[in-house]
Image (cartoon, helix red, strand yellow):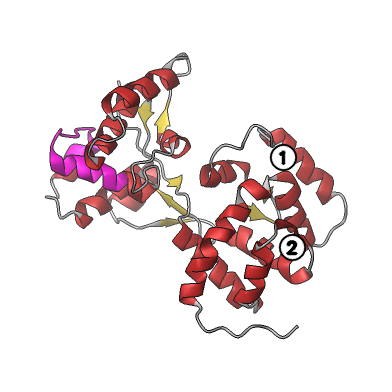
Amino acid sequence: MFSIRLCVSTLVSLWLTGALGFTEHATVEKSLIQAQQECVAYLNLPRHRLYQYLVNNYANDAKTKCMIRCVGLNLRWWAADGTLSEHVIEQYFLPDGSDTGYCERTRLCVERKAPAGDELCSRAYETFQCYLAQYGELLNCPKVVPLGDERLAETMHFCLDALQVPLAALKNYTSSADLYLQTEQSRCLLRCFAIRAGLYSDEHGPFADRFRLQFGPPKPDVFDNDLEGDYCATRLRRAGLDECTLAARVLYECYYFADTLQPALERIVPLLELTMPGEPTPVE
């Protein structure tokens, strides 16, 4: 029932070559097969296990359990502390359209079989088994992998270099969300970062699905559906703004900046300070 659905591109491009799927800028797409292939190599497991995993044969042993945890870390549905990102793992499964209880069954299964406090590899394995048994069909098409803070820092580092913006300026902007709207430099830096992170393009505007994937579902007091965000972005596009101003205002006004990009930018500043030491403070 829960057979793995394979994409032709996955079999040809990923299974046979192991090539990483890069899409726009810093965005990475990766399939379950590729993540398993990488984790088998990382953990030095016998290569024949790949064929077992391909046919959905995940043995209940210590090595397979840690391999599943590695896959979760690789695809960023599993955190090092054992936190599950439901909105990330769900994109690798296809529920039955007639099944209305799969979410609740999966949640109860995870609570019962993978309680907090259990050993991390076992929790990751049992969580994955619950999704296999209760959520839907396991897909194997490449999916966008959320960017970790290190990758977000690399993305911002590139934009700081490309636009010749000093780190001190970023630190100043990050101290208050409103400051990203105040100058051409701040607006263009935000636009560059959002484009390179795969969250925005001048042609399309914000990618709502990638925002949800990267930052999780929005809070109840902000836009909770694509139509509201699209309407807001369309209204601003009609205002005749330059590209940097348009991008900054759309991200700020239409896509809950204070709950998404602002916290992420705050987190990566210390990482940038480690990689960009000794940068002189700009003269005002």
Q: Does the residue at mark 2 contact the one at mark 1 (Cβ under 8 Å)? A: no
Q: Which mark is residue 268?
A: none
Q: Which residue is mark 2?
A: 179
Q: In the image, is residue 14 part of the stretch drawn in magenta? A: no
Q: Quadrant of residue 181?
A: bottom right
- The foreground one among 217 and 27 is 217
Query: Residue 229's mark?
Result: 1
Residue 132 horizontal side relative to residue 170, left or right: left
**Mark 1: few/some/many CA within 10 Å (<14, 14-19, 20+):** many
Report the side of 220 relative to 79 (left or right).
right
Which label lies toward us, 2 or 1? 2
Earlier residue among tags 2 and 1: 2
Q: CA distance from mark 2 to mark 1?
A: 22 Å
Q: Quadrant of the C terminus?
A: bottom right
Check if residue 58 falls in the magenta segment. Answer: yes
* Amino acid carrying mark 1 in the image: Gly
In this view, 224 is above or below 246: above
User: What is the span of residues highlighted in magenta in the rendered image?
Assistant: 51-71
Residue at point 33% right, 51% down? 14
Q: Nearer the viewer, residue 95 or 284?
A: 284
**Image quadrant in which you'd find residue 256:** top right
Q: Quadrant of the N terminus?
A: top left
